[in-house]
Amino acid sequence: DGGITQSPKYLFRKEGQNVTLSCEQNLNHDAMYWYRQDPGQGLRLIYYSQIVNDFQKGDIAEGYSVSREKKESFPLTVTSAQKNPTAFYLCASSIGDSLNSPLHFGNGTRLTVT
Amino acid sequence: AQSVTQLDSQVPVFEEAPVELRCNYSSSVSVYLFWYVQYPNQGLQLLLKYLSGSTLVKGINGFEAEFNKSQTSFHLRKPSVHISDTAEYFCAVTYSSASKIIFGSGTRLSIRP
């Protein structure tokens, strides 16, 4: 079955450490996205990529970095510069740009930083 | 500024009762509208979408939504809910003048037996 795989499901890190969240898709989608979800809030866009080797900042990119070396993969690194990294992170993809293409989501990674 | 408002953060209903989850968006010439559902500790799944055509859109799990351009609303409805509908529901909008999707803050639907 096609879909988006995020790993790990739960991640624990000490403050000051960088951590990388994995996102892989086998849907052959061009566009991929990273969102952050905090309790009681909607989804906030961190980064997105519409093509390999190209990506753009979203609304809350500070303290995060991404790469898009392969169409299938879009890993997110949460750096020590991110002041409040504890959150639920969701990766998504779409066939084209998101204007009229529904997003397909992974099951998320819950990151806890202490 | 372009925005999406979900007026109710929580909606409790009894099993088999009807439910309406409200969504309003800021006015625009052209929009695409979506409803997503999120079950606990999972990602979001598409419930339904409005791109064009009939203003009444039917989705999965018996849900439907109506696009009302004059009221800039896209409310989600189900005539009879089940315990399995317990989840958080997100309204989302893309504006033709923008390059990204905007999500509402979500409505948590809790079903009482």
Image (cartoon, grey):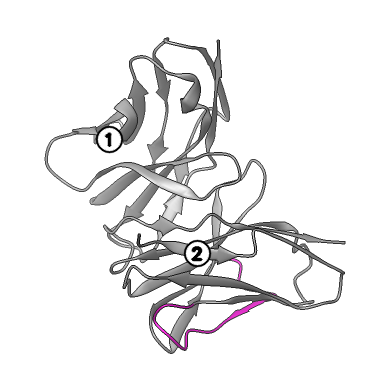
Q: Please state if A5 lies on the left or on the right of B65 as rendered.
A: right
Q: Quadrant of residue B105?
A: top right
Q: Quadrant of residue A81?
A: bottom right
In the displayed image of the protein, which residue is found farthest to the left?
B53
Q: Please state if A14 lies on the left or on the right of B4 as rendered.
A: right
Residue at 42 percent across and 10 percent down: it is B16
Per the rendering, the mark at residue A57 is: none
Residue at 33 percent across and 15 percent down: it is B79
What amino acid type should be assigned to the residue bearing mark 1? Answer: Gly
Q: Is residue B26 above or below residue A23?
A: above
Residue at 79 percent across and 76 percent down: it is A80
**Which residue is nearer to you in this view: A91 or B97?**
A91
Element on which disc 1 rests: loop
Crowding around mark 1 (Cα neighbors within 10 Å: few <14, some 14 to 19, many 20+) is some
Is residue B28 among what the camera can see?
no
Which residue lies under the disc numbered 2? A5
In front of the other: label 2 or label 1?
Answer: 2
In three-dimensional space, the C-alpha distance between marks 2 and 1, rounded to whole angstroms, equals: 25 Å
On what subunit does the disc labeled 1 rest? B
**Which residue is nearer to you in this view: A34 or B73?**
A34
A61 in the magenta segment? yes
Element on which disc 2 rests: strand
What amino acid type should be assigned to the residue bearing mark 2? Answer: Thr
Task: Estimate the x, y position of residue B60 in percent, counting from the top left.
Answer: 30, 35
Q: Which contiguous range is marked in magenta?
A: A60-73
Q: Please state if A84 lies on the left or on the right of B68 as rendered.
A: right
In the displayed image of the protein, which residue is found farthest to the front?
A1
Q: Quadrant of the C terminus of chain B?
A: top right
Task: Estimate the x, y position of residue B61 in percent, counting from the top left.
Answer: 33, 30
Crowding around mark 2 (Cα neighbors within 10 Å: few <14, some 14 to 19, many 20+) is some
